[in-house]
């Protein structure tokens, strides 16, 4: 139908007279570059969210090592805000990174979770050991 022009790789210009021919090598290179960027971003988001998860699990051990004090067990109340930080920040970041979706958001909220853990744990340690 389009004769020699199509065989030479020219576009027939149905949608646009200035249409360019498809370049499979360039498209493949762009897709590979994007996949590599997403791979690094996914690895970073996973690393941050896994670090937050491991720290959250460590806090149970850390709280168990606190001296009994009056024997009431009130130190275990600290599990509630730590769990809140985990389920609000770290867990959604872990799920998103694991599924490869919303990677920038997962990285940002995962980092926010680590910061919240650090601030909260610092406050709890000062309460547990009465330092100022």
Image (tube, rainbow, N blue to C red):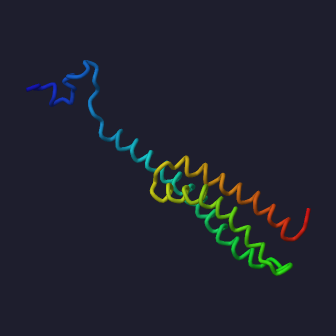
Q: Is residue 128 left or right of residue 20?
A: right
The picture places residue 52, in percent across and down from the top left corner, at: 63, 62
Residue at 77% over, 72% down: 75
- In the image as oriented, which residue stretches furthest toward the top? 17
Q: Nearer the viewer, residue 58 or 8?
A: 58
Q: Is residue 57 left or right of residue 5?
A: right
Residue at 71% over, 54% down: 115
Instruction: Examine the rendered structure and indicate whether residue 25 appears above or below residue 94.
Output: above
Residue at 46% over, 54% down: 100
Instruction: Examine the rendered structure and indicate whether residue 34 appears above or below residue 68.
Output: above
Q: Nearer the viewer, residue 118 or 51?
A: 118
Instruction: Examine the rendered structure and indicate whether residue 93 appears above or below residue 14.
Output: below
User: Quadrant of residue 78 in the image?
Assistant: bottom right
The picture places residue 85, in percent across and down from the top left corner, at: 65, 59
Q: Is residue 93 left or right of residue 83?
A: left
The picture places residue 43, in percent across and down from the top left corner, at: 53, 57
Q: Quadrant of the C terminus?
A: bottom right
The picture places residue 33, in percent across and down from the top left corner, at: 44, 45
Instruction: Examine the rendered structure and indicate whether residue 8 appears above or below residue 57.
Output: above
- In the image as oriented, which residue stretches furthest toward the left? 1
Q: Nearer the viewer, residue 106 or 70?
A: 70
- In the image as oriented, which residue stretches furthest toward the front? 72
Residue at 40% over, 47% down: 32
User: Quadrant of residue 18 in the image?
Assistant: top left
């Amino acid at each position: 139908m389009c004769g020699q022009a199509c065989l030479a790789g020219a576009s027939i210009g149905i949608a646009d007279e200035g249409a360019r021919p498809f370049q499979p090598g360039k498209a493949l290179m762009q897709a590979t570059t994007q996949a590599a960027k997403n791979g690094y971003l996914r690895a970073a988001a996973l690393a941050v969210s896994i670090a937050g998860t491991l720290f959250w699990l460590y806090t149970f051990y850390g709280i168990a090592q606190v001296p009994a004090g009056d024997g009431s067990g009130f130190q275990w109340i600290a599990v509630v805000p730590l769990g809140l930080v985990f389920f609000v920040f770290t867990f959604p970041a872990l799920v998103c990174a694991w599924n490869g979706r919303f990677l920038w958001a997962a990285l940002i909220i995962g980092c926010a979770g680590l910061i919240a853990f650090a601030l909260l744990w610092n406050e709890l340690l000062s309460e547990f050991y009465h330092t100022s």
